[in-house]
Image (cartoon, grey):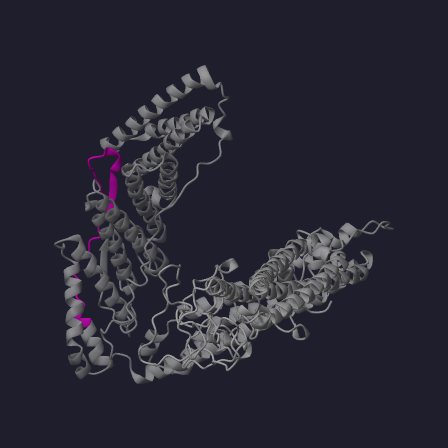
């Protein structure tokens, strides 16, 4: 019988299962005698430890355990031992087998009922039942007033459900061959599994209530508790269980069903009240009250705690009904729907039976490992090969039959033509995937936005180019103004001689922009010219663009429906045959899985060949079914061919196929053209981004150049003005230049200076230009270039647009400064980026965030960023 448990909450009353009782069994002597007779006395002596281990496990099983945990471990260990013994010791009434071991067990629910069998499966079934019972006792002993206790109880109930499910699926049928007890039957094991799942879900319900979860979630979990109890209640009310269990059991489960249905209505009513759906709230609460009222009619023997919990819930529901009806009468005035019009309450299962396959796996057990004789092992291997050959041959037949059906249907264009007649059009899978890819990327309708993006990028590049040119023109104008003002005294090189390479690069950029604009125009023309072709790709769904298969306008005998109906019926029959083949293949695999011949091989006294023929014969009937299935399919395919010919003639199927193929080709052509244009646009976008980086780099160099020239211009202007004012006529040396005139970067007491860079003391300083022998100008000595100082640190230029990483330092360090001739760059750092672009060191600039082709932008005659349309 079940043992009720009560806790601080009366609603938490649950059930646990008592273990089955057994009598003492002599297991050691029969097993040892079998080993001694069939193997050898030495083998029996070698296996003495294993025999003693099995004997002690069976003896411990007959006595009560100290704790449920110890009992659980013993049951698992003994069950694995039984699995090992099953394949080595044939225990049965047969004279050749071990017939002196008789297992006796009492029914757990009716202790007066008992059964005994010479069958190891009976022993395994009883052990599995007790394992499930022990797990339920562990669950019941948990303290569910704590969060950890509720989790432990839920997991133990799920483990109990898993044990009973394993009993039902693996041992019940084998144990029911002879005299057995009802508690280990498949029906009882299934009922107990649902009962344990109900109690596990009830623990989850207690957990969410304690955590204060939302009423909607509580309602779903509570409803699932009721569903599990309903399944257990249904099993208890049909044969053979309806006469086996005490009425208290049935009443308890029945009241639990009503309790948790009403609980779900109550919790859901709280959610409805929050949503102000008062009408449905009243209907749900009344439905819960009705369920409780029906269940309370048969509460004889039910625990008082459970009845009290139901009564408290009933009072809560009545209170909410009264409140809701008052609010509805005064405020909402909603219609209360009838109970039969309410939709079923949603349920959410958060528990499942714990799989026991791994827990009870005995493949790694070492008991009696030496008891497989070589002859039996070889015979088993040969038999396995014979079975595998049958399975392989029949599986190939089944697969070949399915492949033939697919090919024949494809040749007849079925069932696509039937689907087309009904308006269900389909594209070939590869074509459909291509269309979906085009639509995901924006489709033809999205090309205009990408063309606009090309225009925007071209405009940005043009603006950068104009800004850079204006910067150089402004500097050249200022230089010309000073040159005109001071005449021959203004001795620094003209701007045009220093910026020639920069201007050449800017000119190349302008030429590239012009060519890119022409390519953009070609793309725009291609989009306009092919918009009609590509418009089909914007149809959603794309199947709406396919031609339709219409019924004939005129019909002589009006038998189109009959033709279509007959063809559909034949296709359904073909589908049924295919499903049968799948079932036959699964049946073959299942037969092989259950084909355990080893015990028969180990105890066989006759020829192995006779045993093989007898065992292989059980596959004959399924092989015959496979042959009949293949034959029936061949006849049906011939019938479908004739029906399809008639269907094609009536519905003019050939014209439809031709128009459909034409549409497929149009879609393919549209995809190809779209991809071509899309690729050209992408190349254009990549080109403009690359060109923008190049222009930005040159703009930065021009900015540095202009800044340096401005500093030099200011200092030279001040020097010339002082000379003209007669402030620098003292101490003319051999150099012909006033000793008070300072090069750029030297401090001066009365004027603003640019702080010089610290020279490198490790190397001598050399002049940055070669002093020329030239006639002195009136009032001046031999003239230095005042802007030739290489030690002057220039401030960085403005950051490039689009946050492209700034170019490298335009003044790279030189291994040794070389003298330069008059008219060369103002400082040697310019030799690389300004005068000898081809000699720049790769890697001197940080890499941009995208791949840039070398020597970007490409020359106009090498531009490959667009394809000609």
Q: Going 46% across and 63% down the picture, which residue do you hit?
A: 722
Say whether residue 1 is visible.
no
Is 52 situated left or right of 825 in this image?
Answer: left
Is 296 situated above or below 733?
above
Quick one: 533 or 342, which is closer to the camera?
A: 533
Is 287 situated above or below 616?
above
Is 168 situated left or right of 442 in this image?
Answer: left
Q: Going 26% across and 53% down the picture, which residue do you hit?
A: 132
Say whether residue 164 is visible.
yes
Q: Quadrant of residue 608?
A: bottom left
Quick one: 663 or 70, which is closer to the camera?
A: 663
Q: Which residues are magenta?
A: 1-30
Q: Going 39% across and 39% down the picture, which residue do you hit?
A: 220
Q: Quadrant of residue 328?
A: top left
- Quarter of the C terminus within the rendering: bottom right
Quick one: 608 or 392, which is closer to the camera?
A: 392
- Quarter of the N terminus within the rendering: top left
Residue 13: say if magenta.
yes
Residue 748: say if magenta.
no
């Amino acid at each position: 019988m079940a043992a009720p448990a009560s806790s601080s909450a009366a609603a938490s009353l649950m059930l646990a299962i008592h273990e089955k009782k057994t009598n003492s069994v002599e297991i050691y002597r029969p097993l040892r005698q079998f080993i001694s007779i069939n193997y050898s006395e030495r083998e029996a002596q070698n296996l003495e430890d294993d025999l003693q281990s099995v004997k002690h496990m069976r003896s411990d099983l007959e006595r009560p355990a100290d704790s449920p945990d110890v009992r659980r471990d013993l049951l698992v260990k003994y069950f694995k031992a039984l699995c090992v013994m099953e394949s080595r010791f044939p225990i049965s009434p047969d004279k050749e087998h071990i017939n002196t071991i008789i297992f006796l067990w009492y029914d757990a629910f009716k202790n007066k009922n008992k059964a005994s069998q010479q069958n190891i499966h009976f022993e395994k079934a009883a052990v599995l039942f007790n394992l499930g019972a022990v797990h339920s006792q562990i669950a019941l002993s948990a303290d569910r007033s704590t969060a950890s206790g509720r989790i432990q109880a839920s997991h133990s109930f799920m483990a109990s459900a898993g044990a009973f499910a394993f009993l039902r699926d693996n041992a019940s049928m084998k144990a029911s061959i002879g005299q057995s007890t009802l508690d280990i039957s498949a029906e009882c094991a299934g009922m107990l599994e649902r009962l344990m799942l109900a109690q596990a879900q009830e623990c989850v319900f207690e957990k969410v209530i304690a955590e204060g979860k939302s009423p909607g979630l509580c309602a779903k979990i509570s409803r699932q508790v009721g569903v599990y109890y309903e399944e257990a209640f249904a099993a208890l009310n049909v044969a053979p269980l309806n006469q086996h269990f005490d009425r208290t059991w049935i009443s308890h489960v029945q009241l639990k069903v009503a309790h948790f249905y009403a609980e779900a209505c109550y919790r859901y009513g709280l959610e409805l009240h929050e949503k102000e759906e008062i009408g449905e709230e009243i209907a749900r609460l009344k439905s819960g009250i009705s369920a409780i009222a029906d269940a309370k009619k048969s509460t004889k023997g039910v625990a008082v705690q459970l009845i009290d919990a139901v009564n408290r819930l009933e009072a809560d529901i009545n209170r909410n009904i009264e409140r809701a009806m008052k609010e509805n009468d005064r405020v909402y005035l909603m219609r209360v729907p009838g109970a039969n019009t309410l939709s079923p309450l949603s349920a959410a299962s958060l528990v499942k039976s714990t799989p026991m396959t791994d827990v009870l796996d005995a493949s790694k057990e070492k008991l009696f490992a030496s008891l497989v004789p070589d002859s039996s092992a070889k015979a088993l291997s040969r038999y396995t090969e014979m079975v595998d050959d049958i399975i392989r041959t029949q599986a190939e037949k089944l697969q070949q039959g399915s492949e033939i059906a697919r090919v024949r249907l494809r040749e007849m264009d079925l069932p696509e033509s039937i689907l087309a007649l009904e308006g269900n059009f389909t594209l070939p899978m590869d074509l459909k995937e291509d269309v979906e890819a085009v639509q995901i990327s924006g489709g033809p309708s999205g090309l205009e936005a990408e063309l606009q993006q090309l225009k925007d990028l071209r405009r940005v590049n043009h603006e950068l180019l104009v800004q850079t040119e204006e910067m150089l023109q402004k500097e050249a104008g200022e230089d010309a103004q000073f040159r005109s003002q001071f005449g021959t005294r203004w001795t620094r090189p003209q701007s045009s001689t220093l910026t020639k390479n920069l201007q050449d690069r800017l000119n190349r950029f302008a030429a590239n922009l012009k060519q890119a604009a022409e390519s953009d125009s070609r793309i725009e023309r291609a989009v306009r010219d092919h918009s009609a072709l590509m418009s089909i790709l914007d149809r959603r769904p794309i199947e709406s663009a396919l031609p339709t298969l219409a019924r004939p306008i005129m019909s002589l005998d009006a038998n189109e429906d009959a033709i279509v109906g007959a063809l559909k019926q034949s296709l359904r029959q073909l589908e049924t045959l295919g499903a049968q083949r799948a079932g036959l293949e699964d049946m073959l695999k299942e037969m092989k899985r259950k084909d355990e011949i080893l015990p028969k091989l180990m105890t066989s006294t006759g020829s192995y060949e006779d045993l093989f023929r007898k065992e292989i014969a059980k596959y004959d009937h399924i092989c015959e079914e496979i042959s009949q299935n293949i034959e029936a399919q061949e006849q049906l395919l011939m019938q479908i061919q004739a029906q399809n010919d008639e269907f094609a003639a009536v519905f003019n199927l050939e014209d439809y196929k031709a128009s459909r193929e034409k549409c497929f080709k149009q879609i393919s052509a549209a995809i190809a053209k779209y991809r071509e244009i899309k690729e050209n646009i992408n190349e254009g976008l990549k080109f403009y981004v690359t060109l923008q980086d190049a222009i930005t780099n040159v703009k930065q160099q021009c900015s540095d150049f202009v800044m340096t020239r401005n500093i030099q211009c200011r200092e030279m202007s001040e020097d010339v003005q002082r000379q003209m004012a007669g402030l620098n006529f003292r101490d003319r040396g051999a150099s012909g230049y006033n000793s008070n005139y300072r090069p750029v970067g030297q401090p001066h007491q009365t004027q603003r200076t640019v702080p010089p860079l610290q020279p490198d003391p490790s190397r001598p300083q050399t002049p940055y230009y070669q002093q020329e022998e030239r006639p002195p100008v009136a009032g001046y000595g031999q003239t230095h270039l005042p802007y030739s100082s290489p030690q002057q640190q220039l401030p960085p230029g403005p950051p490039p647009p689009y946050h492209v990483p700034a170019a490298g330092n335009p003044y790279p360090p030189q291994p040794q400064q070389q003298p330069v001739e008059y008219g060369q760059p103002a400082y040697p750092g310019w030799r690389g980026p300004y005068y000898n672009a081809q000699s720049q060191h790769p890697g001197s600039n940080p890499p941009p965030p995208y791949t840039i082709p070398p020597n970007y932008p490409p020359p106009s005659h090498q531009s490959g960023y667009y394809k000609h349309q």
